[in-house]
């Protein structure tokens, strides 16, 4: 009996963390970034960063969370002693959660809208121009994208208000494997389109001359974004991990699963985009034009499209839940709000900024700053500044500020797990990860 309990609780963190990690970051943002940053060159840098920096950072967040059993602000306060400045890292994380959630729910709303459109059959017998036109007219619609965003936020707040365990885990456990199945089907279809090989070459053949500071920081930001690290979301989840769980192997499983889904998304989108003549640099519309085009070419595409967008909505929901959870855990523990009140405050606060992100997508919208939409601004500020900085401070905290014995105690579950591998991880956390993040971060500031 004991064995069984252990297993299910271990599966619990993997499922919850994977639920947080898997989402629009993999299916929408990863292809978008890879397309804009040279394809294969981006992929190779991305893989290296996700494995070498992403995994130890995820483990570091788990260590802080489980040690302190608290929200990010409280965790830094508890582990660093009175009068320390470290809780600022927690506050930065909460602010970052607000900013990410604000623009993330714009795209989350699109997934709802696209679910509706696929049910209504809007993608049947459409050519490329028409499908691209649908993206423009949807994002320019006077109220639809706003309504979708607000509905999505309300759904998120509802799940979070009901509590962590039953809320989060139940949703993701069954449905994420199903998403994977549908993506494999899509992948097979995409690879058999005429001209697919060119897309594969773009995605897998690295042109090393394209690797520059911009590619490095974009890959760093994307890997943090995709893995939900660098702002305390997984400190919050770490605080719900039981003492028996193996955090190292859980982190490795999540990183592998997340990376696999991102690569799979690339293998679906690039061959199809090249085949249909969609630019890989298309940006925000890349996934939202390519995918409906692929479905349209498939037998049973109408149904596949509906199921796909339904599952994408759910994958996205488990990610927005984890973002709102950071805010709610902090508000309930630091300001003693009830869970329901905290969820409402979090959702309303997000909506206030989020609505502007959605509006900034309209053609001719005044919400442009230095040539970028307000949406892009939120995306860049969080992925290129907040998360790298947060990630750097988190590894420095675990590597240098926390008691060594406490950290090793967490990593080895009180000495019951082998120490060898954990010492190597500790080395990466202390030296390699901070130097790598620091160099990439500083070099882009200077560029
Ligand atoms: N990782 C999610 C995705 O790829 C987005 C996300 C959820 C996130 N929680 C986060 C990103 C916390 C950064 C931090 O879609």
Image (cartoon, grey):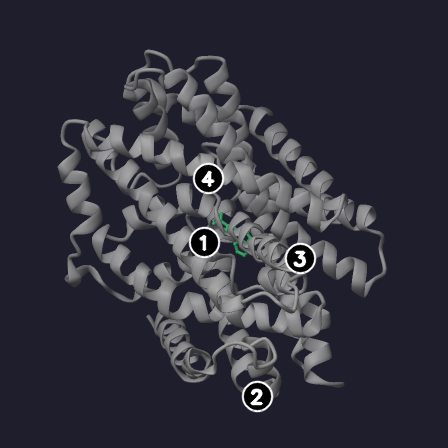
| Sequence-first disc among 1 and 3 | 1
Q: Would you name the residue on which mark 4 appears?
A: 177
Is 437 situated above or below 154? below
At horizontal 55% and vertical 50% (from top left) the residue drawn is 15
Percent coordinates x, y for residue 141 in the rendering: 53, 23
Q: Are marks 4 and 2 in contact (CB under 8 Å)?
A: no
Cα–Cα span, label 1 and label 3: 16 Å
Name the front one of labels 2 and 1. Answer: 2
Q: Is mark 1 within 8 Å of ligand 1?
A: yes
Label 2: few (<14), some (14–19) or many (≥20) C-alpha neighbours in 10 Å = few
Q: Would you name the residue on which mark 2 appears?
A: 404
Name the front one of labels 3 and 4. Answer: 4
Name the front one of labels 3 and 2. Answer: 2
Percent coordinates x, y for residue 368 in the rendering: 49, 45
Pick the residue in front: 47 or 142.
47
Q: Would you name the residue on which mark 3 appears?
A: 326
Is 323 situated above or below 137? below
Q: Quadrant of the C terminus?
A: bottom left
Q: Is mark 3 within 8 Å of ligand 1?
A: yes
Left or right of 102? Residue 178 is: left
Cα–Cα span, label 2 and label 1: 29 Å
Cα–Cα span, label 1 and label 4: 18 Å
Left or right of 433? Residue 277 is: left
Q: Is mark 2 within 8 Å of ligand 1?
A: no
Cα–Cα span, label 4 and label 2: 38 Å
For label 4, the SS is helix
């Amino acid at each position: 009996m004991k064995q069984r309990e252990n297993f299910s609780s271990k599966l619990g963190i993997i499922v919850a963390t994977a639920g947080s990690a898997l989402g629009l970051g993999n299916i929408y943002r990863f292809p978008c970034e890879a397309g804009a940053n040279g394809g294969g060159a981006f992929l190779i840098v991305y893989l290296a960063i996700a494995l070498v920096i992403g995994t130890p950072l995820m483990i570091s967040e788990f260590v802080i969370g489980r040690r302190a059993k608290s929200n990010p602000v409280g965790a830094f306060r508890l582990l660093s002693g009175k009068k320390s400045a470290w809780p600022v890292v927690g506050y930065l994380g909460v602010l970052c959660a607000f900013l990410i959630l604000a623009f993330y729910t714009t795209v989350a709303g699109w997934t709802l809208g696209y679910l509706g459109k696929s049910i209504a059959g809007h993608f049947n017998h459409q050519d490329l121009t028409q499908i691209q036109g649908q993206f423009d007219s949807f994002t320019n619609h006077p109220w639809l994208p706003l309504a979708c965003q607000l509905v999505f936020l309300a759904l998120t707040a509802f799940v979070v208000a009901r509590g962590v365990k039953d809320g989060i885990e139940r949703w993701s456990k069954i449905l994420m494997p199903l998403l994977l199945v549908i993506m494999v089907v899509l992948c097979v279809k995409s690879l058999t389109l005429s001209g697919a090989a060119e897309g594969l070459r773009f995605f897998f053949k690295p042109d090393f001359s394209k690797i520059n500071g911009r590619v490095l920081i974009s890959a760093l930001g994307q890997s943090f974004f995709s893995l939900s690290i660098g702002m305390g979301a997984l400190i919050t989840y770490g605080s719900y991990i039981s003492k028996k769980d193996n955090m190292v192997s859980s982190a490795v499983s999540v990183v592998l699963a997340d990376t696999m889904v991102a690569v799979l998304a690339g293998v679906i989108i690039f061959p199809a985009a090249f085949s249909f003549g969609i630019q890989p640099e298309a940006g925000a519309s890349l996934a939202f034009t390519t995918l409906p085009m692929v479905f349209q070419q498939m037998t049973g595409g109408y149904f596949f499209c509906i199921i796909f967008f339904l599952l994408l909505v759910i994958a996205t929901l488990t990610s927005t839940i984890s973002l709102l959870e950071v805010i709610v855990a902090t508000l309930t523990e630091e300001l003693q709000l009830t869970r329901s009140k905290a969820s409402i405050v979090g959702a309303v606060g997000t909506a206030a900024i989020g609505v502007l992100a959605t509006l900034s997508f309209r053609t001719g919208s005044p919400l442009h700053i230095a040539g970028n939409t307000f949406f892009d601004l939120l995306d860049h500020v969080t992925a290129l500044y907040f998360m790298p900085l947060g990630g750097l401070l988190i590894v420095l905290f675990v590597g240098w500020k926390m008691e060594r014995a406490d950290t090793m105690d967490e990593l080895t579950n009180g000495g019951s797990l082998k120490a060898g591998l954990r010492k190597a991880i500790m080395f990466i956390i202390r030296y390699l990860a901070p130097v790598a993040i620091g160099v990439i971060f500083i070099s882009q500031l200077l560029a």
